[in-house]
Amino acid sequence: MTVKQDAGNLLLFFYDELINKEKRIVDTQDVVDNIKWSSSRIDIAFNFLKDNGWLVIGQTGGGNIRGVQIFRVLRLSPQGIGEVEDTKKFKATFGVEVNFVILKLSLSKEL
């Protein structure tokens, strides 16, 4: 997987949790519990999303959980929602399809 593909899958995870499941926040513990990637892989994908403005982040503290930086995602930005909901644009940006069934499989693999 490339950084962009990982970031796309992580963005889909955040969308599913925040929009489809209507969670108020998604934090590091949620990601670590559900995504079976290495800590650096999660951090790189998360930072890619954050730096591109697709996530609205709450106040974060220092430290980590199982090696993953501590963060709280409050919501997806309008740009983040637009990326996910425009499936052609999402595929062009991230190189993966918007498919929540396939997402669950890819997040459970430690590549």
Image (tube, rainbow, N blue to C red):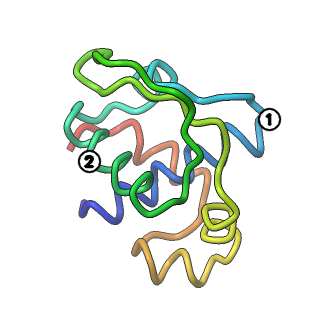
Residue 20, compared with residue 23, is above or below; it is: below
Q: Which residue is mark 1?
A: 22
Residue 82, compared with residue 68, is above or below; it is: below
Q: Residues within 10 Å of mark 2 (few under 14, many from 20)?
A: some
Residue 45, compared with residue 8, is above or below; it is: above
| Residue 106 image offset from top left, x and y in percent | 40, 48
Relative to 66, is 75 on the left or the right?
right
| Residue 36 image offset from top left, x and y in percent | 33, 31
Q: Residues within 10 Å of mark 1 (few under 14, many from 20)?
A: few
Relative to 17, is 46 on the left or the right?
left
Residue 87, compared with residue 29, is above or below; it is: below
In three-dimensional space, the C-alpha distance between marks 2 and 1, rounded to whole angstroms, equals 25 Å
| Residue 27 image offset from top left, x and y in percent | 52, 25
Mark 2 touches mark 1? (CB < 8 Å) = no
**Residue, x 40% and y 33% (percent of image)?**
35
**Residue, x 56% and y 53% (percent of image)?**
12
**Residue, x 43% and y 55% (percent of image)?**
49
User: Any mark on residue 109, and which?
Assistant: none
| Residue 69 image offset from top left, x and y in percent | 31, 27
SS type, badge 2 = helix
Q: Amino acid at mark 1?
A: Glu
Q: Which residue is mark 2?
A: 44
Q: Amino acid at mark 2?
A: Ile
Give the quarter of the figure containing the C terminus. Answer: top left
SS type, badge 1 = loop
Give the quarter of the figure containing the N terminus. Answer: bottom left
Q: Earlier in the sequence, mark 2 or mark 1?
A: 1
Q: How many numbered circles does the render carry?
A: 2
